[in-house]
Image (spheres, coloured by chain):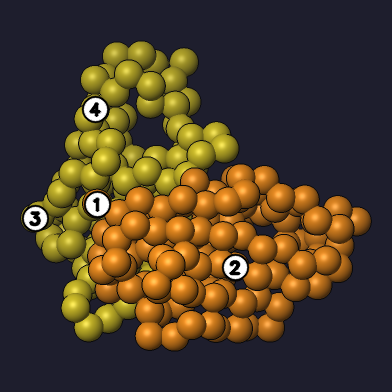
Amino acid sequence: GENVEQHPSTLSVQEGDSAVIKCTYSDSASNYFPWYKQELGKRPQLIIDIRSNVGEKKDQRIAVTLNKTAKHFSLHITETQPEDSAVYFCAASNYGQNFVFGPGTRLSVLP
Amino acid sequence: DGGITQSPKYLFRKEGQNVTLSCEQNLNHDAMYWYRQDPGQGLRLIYYSQIVNDFQKGDIAEGYSVSREKKESFPLTVTSAQKNPTAFYLCASSRTPGTSAYNEQFFGPGTRLTVL
């Protein structure tokens, strides 16, 4: 079955700096890779996703890159702000089936 | 944040008791899921259902049971057989998983279960 690893488990950055979170997956059949943000005590919410037919997707300060050959994808947040502080989860799925989540990264943006 | 709801928000259970967590969605989604989240941990799949009257075990189904009698509802029962049930439980739903669509999961607000 699919296995998703995520690094780092915790990340602290200064406000205004960039943050990068990396995930690897094992199943070459996976073709959908969402990223979720979870604030303390709240539900995970989708912030960006990427399909396997593209290598990069950007939405304002957030971008995701995908390397299918190496089976890894990354979340990039630029110009970080305090409200970016949260736990971020990556996931891998095959057409929206059998989601497997990474263990999460706790991002702290320091003022 | 509407569309998928969970109740109650907080639940306290005595050891040896069964409790049922509610999950309802009005998004007309076929698929529904239950995850368990422990402090500082990721999401682990308990059960999922892709269609009414059918459900499948996830990675940590032991000590849990579910039913899917209606499309809108997917209740989770935490039985006394679950030895360490204290956790945050998240329900999610998505459109029909299939071979032609990439369907994100939408999460409910969660239920925090504490065993006393």
What is the display colour for chain B? yellow
Q: Residues within 10 Å of mark 1 (few under 14, many from 20)?
A: few
Expressed as whole percent of the image width and height from the top left, the position of residue B107 reads 43, 59
Left or right? Give the position of A105 relative to A2: right
Q: Are marks 3 and 4 on the same chain?
A: yes
Number of numbered discs on residues: 4
The residue carrying pointer 2 sits among few (fewer than 14), some (14 to 19) or many (20 or more) residues within 10 Å by Cα, namely many
Q: Which mark is residue A75?
A: 2
Q: Which mark is residue B53?
A: 3
Callouts 1 and 2 on one subunit: yes
Chain A shown in which color? orange
Depth check, mark 3 against mark 4: the one in front is 4
The residue beneath circle 4 is B63
C-alpha separation, residue under disc 4 versus residue under disc 1: 22 Å
- Inter-mark Cα distance, 2 to 3: 38 Å
Give amino acid for label 3.
Asn
Amino acid type assigned to the residue bearing label 4 in the image: Gly
| Dot 4: chain letter | B
Residue A1, numbered circle: 1
Give how far apart the Cα atoms at labels 1 and 2 are. Answer: 23 Å
x then y, percent, for residue B85: 38, 26
Q: Secondary structure at mark 1?
A: loop
- Which residue lies most toward the right here? A111
- What amino acid does circle 1 point to? Gly
What is the number of the mark on residue B79? none
Q: Chain of mark 1?
A: A
- Residue A55 can be seen in this image: yes
